Image (spheres, coloured by chain):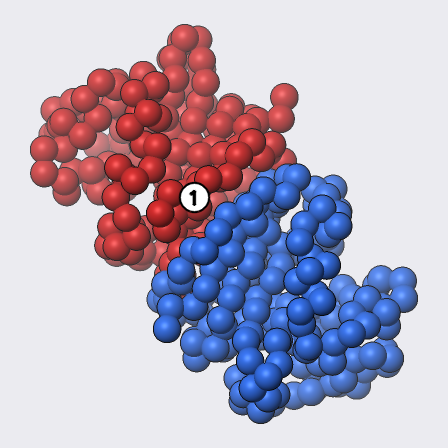
Chain colours: A red, B blue
């Protein structure tokens, strides 16, 4: 099993602007210009928070966006979207129970990522940095993380995205 | 004239921890492992805020750290350190008056950088990302910046630093 964070942030560390818009991201480039397809093909499970799921819901054909993975949304409510399963409880416990042979993509937000980081459960972080300052928005990292060091494996340039690939230090 | 930001931040965007310590930086690597020497040789002027200067003051032989540049510190107080000049007033006006043939290194912190960014006076940003999450600290970017896009010129890997080089979009 390996747990991945994979996602795009602005240069000032935001996943989305305050209104949860991603237009700055679409203005930077398309996922096709990165290694996204290869990444997604290797995943078995996606995990996301309720607000990240709201972004997915806005897409046309949301049900087909993540077709080959089991897709879980942490929420206390119900989901009306085919292809996604509502779950609740402790994120770290959920991840541990998913099984040892699964590759798990943690999509965010920080309420999902922070507890996994703090329990040292994130094996890989693959971050695309968009060349944009938003000034304010929804941060990827919050003050809930404890101090932690990763291993920088590789840097790549995909069009206007700088991709930083990190591994967990055992 | 060109205005540069050049400096190191953590993966979660901090210039220093809350106590203004940089031990996480020294644990990541030494400036010699990056292109720092070439960068510094090209600079004519350094500009820093009072708190950044305090970091410099802690060094042995602070007077010799930036030997070939004119070094200015924005502060309302006096400086007791040879080789540095206290200045005050509007940062952007100061930069404009420095002269058209100067290369200016803006070292931070955000109180110096944000007004220059907002007046579109920063020509180059060269950021080394250290593979560390601090959780809290002194951020490079604050909520004082307005939305702005840069041009990603290059990404490099220097040991455990990921260096992202950006240019201003005219």
Residue B67's image quarter? Answer: bottom right
Q: Position of residue A157 (x, y in %)?
A: 43, 43
Residue in front for this viewpoint, B46 or A170:
B46
Q: Residue at x 45, y 13 (%)?
A: A1
Relative placement, left or right, of A34 versus A145 is: left
Residue in front for this viewpoint, A6 or A165:
A165
Please say if B44 is above or below A17. below
Q: Is residue B135 visible?
A: no
Seen as rendered, the residue at the extreme right is B61
Relative placement, left or right, of A19 versus B32 is: left
Q: Residue at x 26, y 55 (%)?
A: A27
Residue B36's image quarter? Answer: bottom right
Q: Position of residue B122 (x, y in %)?
A: 49, 72
Residue in front for this viewpoint, A40 or B68:
B68
**Element type at marker 1?**
strand
Question: Total label count?
Answer: 1
Q: Residue at x 74, y 85 (%)?
A: B86
Please say if B118 is above or below A78. below
Question: In the rendered image, which residue does mark 1 sit on?
Answer: A157
Which of the image's four quarters has the C terminus of chain B?
A: bottom left
Chain of the residue on which disc 1 is drawn: A
Please say if A132 is above or below A124. below
């Amino acid at each position: 099993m390996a747990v991945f964070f994979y996602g795009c942030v602005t240069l000032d560390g935001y996943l989305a602007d305050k209104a949860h818009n991603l237009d700055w991201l679409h203005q930077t480039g398309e996922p096709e210009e990165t290694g996204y397809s290869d990444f997604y093909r290797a995943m078995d499970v996606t995990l996301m928070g309720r607000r990240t799921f709201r972004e997915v819901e806005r897409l046309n054909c949301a049900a087909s966006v993540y077709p080959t993975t089991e897709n879980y949304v942490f929420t206390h409510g119900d989901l009306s979207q085919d292809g996604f399963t509502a779950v609740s409880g402790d994120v770290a416990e959920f991840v541990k129970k998913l099984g040892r042979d699964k590759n798990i993509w943690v999509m965010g937000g920080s309420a999902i990522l922070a507890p996994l980081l703090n329990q040292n459960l994130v094996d890989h972080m693959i971050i695309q940095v968009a060349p944009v300052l938003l000034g304010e928005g929804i941060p990827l990292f919050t003050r809930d993380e404890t101090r932690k060091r990763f291993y920088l494996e590789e840097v790549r340039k995909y069009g206007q995205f700088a991709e930083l690939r990190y591994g967990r230090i055992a």
